[in-house]
Structure formats: structure tokens, C-alpha cells
Amino acid sequence: MRQKLKNLRNLTKTYELFIGVGLLMIIAASIKLLGWLDFSSDFFWFVAGLALTVERTILLRKQKQFDKKYKVVLREESKV
């Protein structure tokens, strides 16, 4: 039970990071559109790459948890 709670907390933290990166992109785009600050578009590409990295990390972690919980058997292996 404690392990499940720990996994849930870790998963929540990663989703919070993903949401935070998305909010950062929204806020930065709004600031640039309002003309308050003018910065390079490279910043947006950096944040987008960070968001993709966080998303992929979440997906890999969930896939590993699924593979650990359920044994995946391919059709070719089950015939043998």
C-alpha cells in the first residue's frame, strides 16, 4: 500500500511539472503578444523541447509500471 502511494506521489509530481511547463509557455507567449517583453523564439523551442522530454518521461514511467504489473506475451511466443 505504501509503495502505491509513493508511486502516485511521484506520478503527480511529474504531471505537475508537465502542467507547469505548459503554463510557462502560455504566460511567455502572452507577455510577448502584449508587447511587455520581446525575446527570441528560441526560448519557446527550448520550453517546447523541455515539455516533450517531460511528457516522454511520464510515458516511459507508465509503460514500465504496466510491463512490471502485467506480463506481456507476444502471439509467436505463446505458440511455442
Image (tube, rainbow, N blue to C red):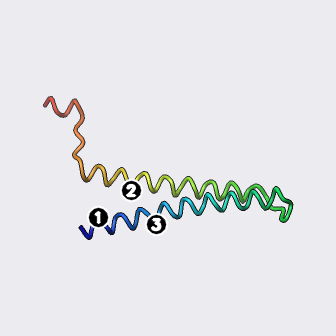
Q: Amino acid at mark 2?
A: Arg
How much space separates mark 3 and mark 1, taking CA atoms? 14 Å
Location of residue 6 (image quadrant): bottom left
Question: Residue 35 placed where, x, y %?
Answer: 86, 60
Query: Which of label 2 and label 1 is nearer to you?
Result: 1
Query: Which of label 3 and label 2 is nearer to you?
Result: 3
For mark 3, does the 10 Å Cα neighbourhood hold few (<14), some (14 to 19), or many (20 or more) residues?
A: few
How much space separates mark 2 and mark 1, taking CA atoms? 14 Å
Q: What residue is rendered at 16% in x and 33% in y? A: 78
> Disc 2 marks which residue?
61
Q: What residue is rendered at 48% in x and 52% in y? A: 56
Question: Residue 37 placed where, x, y %?
Answer: 83, 65
> Disc 1 marks which residue?
4
Secondary structure at badge 3 equals helix
Vertical side of 20 occupied by 67: above or below = above
Taking 47 as reference, is 6 left or right?
Answer: left
Vertical side of 6 occupied by 65: above or below = above
Vertical side of 12 occupied by 66: above or below = above
Q: Amino acid at mark 1?
A: Lys
Q: Amino acid at mark 3?
A: Lys
Q: What residue is rendered at 39% in x and 67% in y? A: 9
Q: What residue is rendered at 24% in x and 42% in y? A: 72
Secondary structure at badge 1 equals helix
Q: Earlier in the sequence, mark 3 or mark 1?
A: 1
> Disc 3 marks which residue?
13
Q: Are marks 3 and 2 in contact (CB under 8 Å)?
A: no
Question: Residue 64 placed where, x, y %?
Answer: 33, 53
Location of residue 50 (image quadrant): bottom right
Q: Earlier in the sequence, mark 2 or mark 1?
A: 1
Question: In the orientation shown, which residue stands out farthest toward the right?
Answer: 35
Image quarter of the C terminus: top left
